[in-house]
Amino acid sequence: MGGVTAPTYVGSDQSAEPIDNYMALRGFSRLRLDRLGMGAPDRLYGGHRLLLLVELKTGDRKRTPKQLKWAQLWRGPEVYVWRTPEDAQKALRVLGLT
């Protein structure tokens, strides 16, 4: 399927693996957007008739100015910031999916 890939992790993407795995277990597909640059979010998850844009961060890292600008200009749904699978779980709970 064009753009939807099995998980592969290199460099800083290793921090995304637990979140990607959790979302796959919850029935979501994943599209990597991190290679687009320009401040675009790292992931687009799709499942359960939902699309979720997610910026993945580790530790106390904050969004860059480009990422903040992209989110400000984006007219679609909210861009989530997740650091752990627990963040994903909380978001899915709020959406009524857990």
Image (cartoon, rainbow, N blue to C red):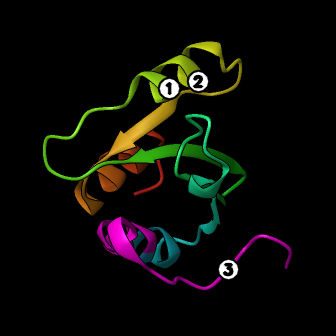
Circle 3 is placed at which residue position?
Answer: 5
On the image, the x and y values in percent for residue 37 come to 61, 44
Image disc number at residue 70: 2
Q: Residues within 10 Å of mark 2 (few under 14, many from 20)?
A: some
Q: Where in the figure is residue 57, as x and y percent of width and height?
A: 30, 48
Indicate the amino acid at tag 1: Lys
Q: Please, what is the three-letter code of the amino acid marked with disc 2? A: Trp
Quarter of the image where the C terminus is located: bottom left
**Amino acid type, residue under disc 3 in the picture:** Thr
Q: CA separation, marks 3 and 2? A: 24 Å
Identify the element where label 2 is drawn: helix
Are the residues at dot 3 and dot 2 in contact (C-beta closer than 8 Å)? no
Distance between the alpha carbons at the discs numbered 3 and 1 = 26 Å
**Which residue is rendered at x = 62% and y = 57% of the image?**
35
Disc on res. 20 = none
Residue 87 left/right relative to 28: left
Q: Nearer the viewer, mark 3 or mark 2?
A: 2
Residue toward you, 73 or 90: 73
Classify 18 as above or below 39.
below
Residue positioned 66% across, 21% down in the render: 74
Question: For the magenta stretch, what is the residue range?
Answer: 1-20
Pick the quarter of the image with the N terminus.
bottom right
Residue 66: mark: 1
| Residue 9 is covered by the magenta coloring | yes
